[in-house]
């Protein structure tokens, strides 16, 4: 029984000790937590005090900045931002976005004011200098005005003297004029008589000159028929085809071109210019350096063109251009109309050059020189009213005599170059001969008929 009581007492004592220890631990933890909280509270109060101090300082600085910027110390942020945006819109539009601040704008305004002040100082200096120069000019002007007034006074005095002299001279001139008029009337009557006499003499001389020119032309024709020319053949016939096609020993290396015409004469005749013509040919194709095809444009069945016959052109010469002059009425087809342009085209088509020619109005175009080979004589202008044409005829004949140019008639010229007027259908425009393409005839306002040579195989060169 006693043992059980002791055991219960021990249990109770153990429970008490456990509760006491637990209570002590709880009180210890409570007091420790309370001490830490007090320390945190004290630290928080210190931080709050510090932040309040900083807020007070920031507010004081903000009020100072607002005052420095010209705002009220208690101005709200919205009003400040609004005013700043308005100021930047008004004063800072020319500035970049990162420079739109009061300090940059004030610095720019200060620099501009400084420049304005410098320009103002320079302007004042310039105005001062101009004023000084103006004063000097006014002083000089005064002197010049005084001199001009003195000169004007002297000029007035001179004018008065000259006026008197002018009146006297005028009276003398009027007297002289009356005498001259009387003398002029007398001289006019005398001169008119002399003019009538001279006109009669001129008319007589013109009639004599016309007869003299005709006689000269006849003498030139006779001389051309009787004298030797010493002209040699330009080439020869290499082959003859019975269909009217021949081949000659001239070609590209001889500067030969299509549509050049030649007269044909027997191989035993030596003087090409005076030889008896037996036919004519026209070049249609260039086949080689010394080979070309031609068509027969004129022949005589009793004396046909044969292989070995010689060919000659008054216009074309191997390897060089012959120079010509033309005068008188150039009438190729005997219709009474001038064919001067056609004759010029024929010469240029055959590789020649026209140095000078006489127009229908009597104007001499161009000039002969020492290189001019022939002067082609057209019909002599016999009508009395064609004075300009006769003067042009005379001038060109005298010029040919000076330069030693050989004179030939139009018929000789056409005959020696193998031209037949009935073979032509339309006129050849000036310069159109240079186009040698066979398919293009659009450029020729007055050209030969297009040639279409027969499709005959070309022979081999001889």
Image (cartoon, rainbow, N blue to C red):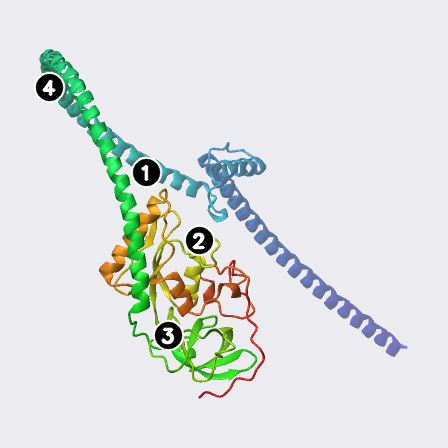
- Quarter of the image with the C terminus is bottom left
Residue 301 visible in the snapshot: yes
Q: Earlier in the sequence, mark 3 or mark 1?
A: 1
Tag 2 near tag 4, CB within 8 Å: no
Query: Regarding mark 4 in the picture, which secondary structure is present there?
Result: helix
Q: Earlier in the sequence, mark 2 or mark 3?
A: 3
Mark 3 vs mark 4, foreground winner is 3
**Picture coordinates of residue 164 (x, y %)?**
10, 11
Quadrant location of the N terminus in the rendered image:
bottom right
Residue sitting nearer the eye, 331 or 92: 331
Residue 407 visible? The answer is no
Of label 2 and label 4, which has the lower sequence position? 4
Q: In the picture, residue 196 is in which quadrant?
A: top left
Q: Residue 202, located in which quarter of the rendered image?
A: top left
Mark pair 3, 4: CA separation: 96 Å
Q: How far from the left and from the top, in percent, is residue 211?
A: 30, 50
Q: CA distance from mark 4 to mark 1?
A: 47 Å
Q: Is residue 354 above or below residue 383?
A: below
Residue at x-position 49% and y-position 61%: 428
Q: Which numbered circle lies on residue 115?
A: 1
Q: Nearer the viewer, residue 63 or 286?
A: 286
Of the residues tagged 2 and 3, which is closer to the observer?
Answer: 3
Query: Residue tagged by mark 2?
Result: 338
Q: CA distance from mark 3 to mark 1?
A: 104 Å
User: Where does label 4 land, which residue?
Assistant: 147
Query: Mark 4 or mark 1, which has the lower sequence index?
Result: 1
Which label lies toward us, 2 or 1?
2
Q: Are marks 2 and 3 in contact (CB under 8 Å)?
A: no
Q: Tags 3 and 1 in contact by the CB under 8 Å rule?
A: no
Look at the numbered disc 3 and give the secondary structure of its residue: loop
Would you call the spot at circle 2 few (<14 residues within 10 Å), some (14-19), or many (20 or more)? Answer: some
């Amino acid at each position: 029984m006693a043992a059980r009581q002791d055991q219960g007492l021990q249990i109770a004592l153990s429970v008490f000790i456990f509760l006491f220890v637990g209570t002590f631990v709880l009180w210890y933890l409570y007091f420790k937590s309370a001490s830490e909280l007090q320390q945190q509270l004290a630290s928080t109060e210190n931080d709050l005090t510090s932040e309040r101090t900083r807020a007070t300082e920031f507010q004081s600085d903000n009020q100072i900045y607002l005052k420095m910027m010209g705002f009220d110390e208690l101005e709200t942020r919205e009003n400040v931002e609004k005013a700043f945006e308005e100021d930047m819109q008004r004063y800072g539009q020319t500035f970049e976005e990162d420079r739109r601040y009061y300090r940059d704008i004030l610095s720019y305004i200060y620099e501009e004011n400084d420049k304005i002040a410098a320009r103002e100082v320079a302007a004042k200096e310039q105005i001062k200098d101009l004023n000084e120069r103006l004063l000097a000019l006014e002083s000089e002007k005064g002197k010049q005005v005084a001199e001009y007034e003195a000169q004007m006074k002297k000029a007035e005095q001179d004018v008065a003297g000259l006026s008197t002299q002018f009146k006297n001279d005028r009276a003398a001139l009027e007297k002289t004029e009356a005498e001259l008029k009387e003398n002029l009337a007398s001289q006019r009557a005398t001169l008119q008589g002399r003019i009538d006499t001279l006109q009669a003499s001129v008319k007589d001389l013109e009639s004599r000159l016309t007869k003299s020119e005709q006689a000269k032309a006849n003498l030139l024709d006779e001389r051309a028929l009787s004298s030797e020319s010493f002209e040699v053949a330009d080439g020869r016939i290499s082959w003859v085809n019975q269909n009217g096609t021949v081949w000659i020993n001239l070609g590209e290396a001889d500067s030969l071109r299509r549509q050049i015409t030649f007269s044909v004469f027997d191989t035993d005749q030596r003087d090409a210019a005076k030889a008896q013509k037996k036919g004519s040919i026209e070049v249609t194709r260039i086949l080689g350096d010394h080979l070309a095809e031609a068509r027969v444009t004129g022949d005589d069945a009793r004396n046909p063109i044969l292989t070995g016959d010689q060919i000659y052109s008054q216009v074309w010469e191997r390897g060089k251009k012959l120079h010509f002059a033309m005068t008188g009425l150039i009438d190729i087809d005997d219709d009474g109309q001038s064919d001067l342009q056609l004759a010029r085209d024929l010469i240029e088509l055959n590789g020649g050059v026209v140095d000078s020619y006489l127009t229908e109005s009597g104007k001499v175009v161009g000039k002969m020189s020492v290189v001019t080979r022939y002067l082609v004589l057209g019909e002599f202008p016999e009508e009395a009213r064609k004075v300009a044409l006769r003067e042009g005829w005379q001038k060109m004949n005298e010029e040919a005599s000076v330069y030693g140019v050989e004179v030939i008639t139009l018929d000789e010229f056409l005959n020696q170059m193998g031209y037949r007027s009935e073979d032509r259908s339309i006129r050849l425009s000036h310069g159109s001969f240079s186009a040698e393409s066979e398919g293009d005839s659009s450029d020729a306002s007055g050209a030969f008929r297009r040639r279409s040579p027969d499709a005959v195989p070309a022979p081999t060169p001889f």
